[in-house]
Amino acid sequence: MDGELFIIDGFPSSEGPVMIQSSVTTGINQLCSFTILSANCSSWGEVSSQELIIPESCSGIWAQIILTCSAQEQGTQYDRFGAVWIGNLEVLRTTTAEPARDGITWYVEKDISDYRSCIQSQSGLNTYISIPNNVDSTYTGIISATITLTIYANMLTLMSQLS
């Protein structure tokens, strides 16, 4: 996908949002996957935070980090802008889907491997999510979001850990 230009005629239906998926580099295997933050976004100016604790199963040399934001919402609401930070690094800027009558679920994946050294060496950083949202008698949709990291390691790293 790098360097390719995609032209979309109009916007996709809010009832079938486009989901972006990152590709995992060939020759690496999943080392671990863990949730770094879960939050319900229901007010303006709200920032949810949680300490980033990297599990023991994630030790080794990281080849790739995929951040996944999965979310759901039901009710009446407009799309909202939001962001995710790990420490002082803004790692995702996104918008939400407008919910359908029966609710909607969506996710976004982003390769944040460029931040490997900052994240891997800093267990204990705070993680944050902010999706300013107005909930009242008219706009009833509360956004429920979960942020996970999936860490991949080179095959050589995995083989050396087995030795």
Image (cartoon, helix red, strand yellow):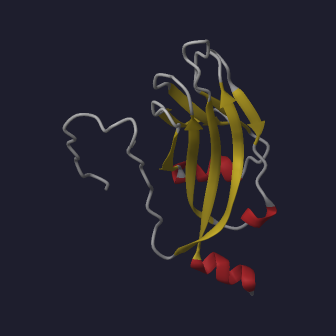
Task: Residue at 80%, 63% (x, y): give it.
Answer: 56
Quadrant, the N terminus: bottom left
Q: Where residue 72 sits: x, y (%)?
A: 57, 39
Can residue 95 be seen from the camera position used here? Answer: no
- Say above or below: 89 vs 21: above
- Say above or below: 116 vs 14: below
Can residue 78 be seen from the camera position used here? Answer: yes
Q: Where residue 32 sits: x, y (%)?
A: 68, 64
Quadrant, the C terminus: bottom right
Q: Where residue 151 sits: x, y (%)?
A: 62, 61
- Say above or below: 1 vs 79: below
Q: Where residue 93 sits: x, y (%)?
A: 49, 33
Depth order, front residue of 134/102: 102
Q: Is residue 122 left or right of residue 5?
A: right
Q: Is residue 27 left or right of residue 85?
A: left
Task: Residue at 68%, 31% (x, y): give it.
Answer: 40
Task: Residue at 62%, 38% (x, y): give it.
Answer: 145
Task: Residue at 69%, 34% (x, y): give it.
Answer: 39
Task: Say which quarter of the image contains residue 33.
Answer: bottom right
The residue at the far top in this view is 137
Depth order, front residue of 136/96: 136
- Say above or below: 68 vs 101: below
- The image shows a total of numbered marks equal to 0
The residue at the far bottom in this view is 163
Task: Say which quarter of the image contains residue 158.
Answer: bottom right
